[in-house]
């Protein structure tokens, strides 16, 4: 997916199909004390179309060893179903056999779409369709490979369970919404290595030829020592699910937990703010260039144009200056505002030149060693990351992206801590934070961590006053 396409997807308000209305009693029947959720809306047909026009790199090397690899999908939104579509596209010897989501309507809608696209490779019996907060445990138990694509707040819980059960994992980015979650993911990542489990993380630029070839040249010295970096995800407001619309669909009042789960992008315990959920892609590229993470950050941000009860508690803009161990600085910018300059890209300046990186198809080195990547007939990186994971599973080669996914997620969270507090935040202080954003239990009648005030507005961070570490 190009940067332009990413931006277009981000800008389109595209709520997921809601073709199954169920009652409050149905919800309460699925209440439990563990967690699973929905995912960011997407379009399955778009992923399928991209796969058809771009053959995958080294597809002939995918070893068909005769073993059928079974897949469970946890989180049946657009991105989860897109990931399932790509996993099913890796070879003939794969089958989707279980699905889990908090909401029955999301599961049924995307199951139908996957069946249309993949036919017999989708064999999810009714007894293997699980809903509710404890659904993930049941689905994980049935498969060889687990796709984790719920809202990011649940990722540490689900990743821990998958590793505990000895399953290979593909998990979407980001991998947590607070430092405690990062700590859990790092611990589970180590356990996965001990168990020889393969783990992929959905930072697809790491599997895109333009990035791979350009960054190798940079790390080989093409522009000298890096002295400054910039990265952007500036675009329009993505989807929003208003309480009024969701209650109209349901034909009843929603509990606060139901509403926040439906409109998860705007609540920190579920999403982590858009600097985490979205801008992590660009931040991860800079960490990749630097072969490490920052040591501190300071920045500014707030809510200026995106206000109101249906926009929860997150900011609509962040600007962060990250400092790396060698003293080099990253200027990181992300914004959700209509009618402004849009940009999704990464840049760096070195002692011998500069580089521009853009998922939309431009990778160029300027200076002492000028070079441009020829972006012709390149594989779809969303498909490629699954091809690489499944190749490692079948060939039993080392493959674990969990740690670097966790550290890039933590970098985004460090940025959020800086903008929310208005202070300089040190990496060691941030990653060891004991602040817990997640509920202590889960159920449709459980009170979420944040509630609206009498005016219907949710409290949000106030720089200079908010305690974030």
Image (cartoon, rainbow, N blue to C red):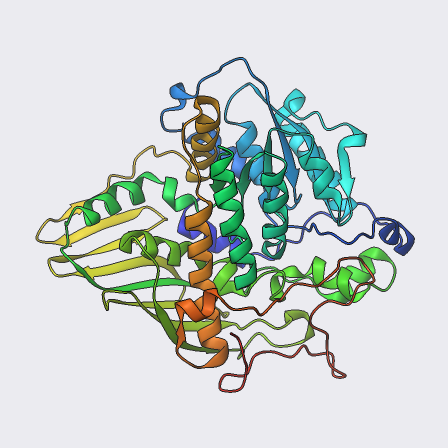
Q: Position of residue 379 (x, y in %)?
A: 38, 33
Q: Could you tell whether 115 is left or right of 349 in the image?
A: right
Residue at x-position 48% and y-position 27%:
393
Residue closest to the eye, 357 or 314: 314
Q: Nearer the viewer, residue 370 or 102?
A: 102
Look at 16% across and 58% down and name the residue there: 225
Direction right: furthest residue: 25
| In this view, 311 is above or below 199 | below
Rendering quarter of residue 45:
top right
Looking at the rendering, which quadrant does residue 332 occupy?
Answer: bottom left
Classify the position of the N terminus by image quarter.
top left
Q: Is residue 405 left or right of residue 17?
A: left
Residue 155: image location, x then y, percent: 59, 51
Report the side of 355 relative to 34 (left or right): left
- Residue at the spot x=77%, y=45% of the render? 105
Residue 438: x and y, percent?
65, 63
Q: Quadrant of residue 296?
A: bottom left
**In this rendering, position of residue 266 left or right of residue 347:** right
């Amino acid at each position: 997916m190009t940067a332009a396409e990413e931006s277009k997807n981000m800008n389109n308000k595209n709520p997921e199909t809601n073709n199954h209305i169920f009652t409050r009693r149905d919800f309460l029947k699925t209440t439990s004390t563990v967690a699973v959720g929905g995912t960011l809306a997407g379009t399955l047909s778009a992923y399928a179309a991209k796969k058809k026009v771009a053959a995958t790199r080294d597809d002939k090397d995918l070893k068909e060893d005769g073993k059928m690899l079974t897949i469970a999908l946890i989180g049946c939104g657009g991105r989860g179903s897109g990931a399932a579509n790509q996993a099913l596209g890796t070879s003939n010897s794969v089958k989707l056999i279980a699905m889990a989501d908090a909401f029955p309507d999301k599961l049924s809608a995307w199951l139908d779409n996957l069946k249309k696209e993949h036919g017999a490779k989708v064999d999810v019996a009714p007894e293997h369709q699980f809903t509710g907060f404890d659904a993930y445990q049941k689905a994980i138990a049935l498969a060889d490979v687990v796709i984790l694509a719920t809202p990011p707040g649940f990722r540490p819980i689900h990743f821990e369970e998958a590793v505990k059960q000895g399953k290979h994992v593909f998990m979407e980015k980001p991998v947590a919404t607070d430092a405690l979650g990062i700590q859990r993911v790092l611990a589970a990542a180590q356990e996965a290595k001990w168990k020889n489990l393969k783990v992929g993380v959905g930072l697809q630029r790491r599997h895109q030829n333009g990035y791979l070839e350009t960054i190798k040249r940079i790390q080989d010295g093409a522009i000298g020592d890096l002295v400054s970096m910039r990265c952007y995800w500036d675009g329009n407001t993505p989807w929003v699910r208003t309480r009024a619309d969701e209650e109209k669909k349901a034909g009843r009042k929603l509990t606060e937990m139901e509403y926040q789960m439906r409109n998860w992008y705007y609540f920190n315990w579920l999403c982590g703010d858009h600097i985490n959920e979205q801008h992590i892609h660009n931040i991860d590229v800079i960490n990749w260039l630097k072969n490490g993470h920052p040591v501190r950050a300071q920045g500014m941000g707030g809510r200026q144009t995106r206000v109101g009860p249906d926009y929860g508690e997150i900011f609509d803009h962040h600007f962060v200056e990250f400092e790396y161990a060698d003293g080099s600085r990253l200027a990181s910018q992300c914004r959700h505002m209509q009618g402004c300059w849009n940009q999704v890209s990464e840049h760096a300046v070195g002692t011998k030149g500069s580089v521009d990186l853009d998922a939309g198809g431009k990778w160029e080195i300027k200076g002492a060693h000028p070079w441009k990547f020829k972006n012709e007939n390149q594989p779809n990186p969303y498909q490629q990351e699954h091809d690489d994971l499944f190749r490692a599973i079948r060939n039993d080669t080392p493959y674990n992206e969990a740690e670097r996914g966790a550290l890039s997620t933590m970098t985004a969270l460090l940025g959020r801590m800086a903008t929310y507090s208005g202070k300089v935040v040190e990496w060691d202080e941030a990653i060891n934070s004991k602040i817990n954003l997640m509920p202590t239990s889960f159920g449709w009648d459980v009170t979420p961590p944040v509630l609206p005030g009498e005016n219907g507005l949710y409290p949000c961070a106030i720089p200079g006053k908010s305690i974030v570490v």
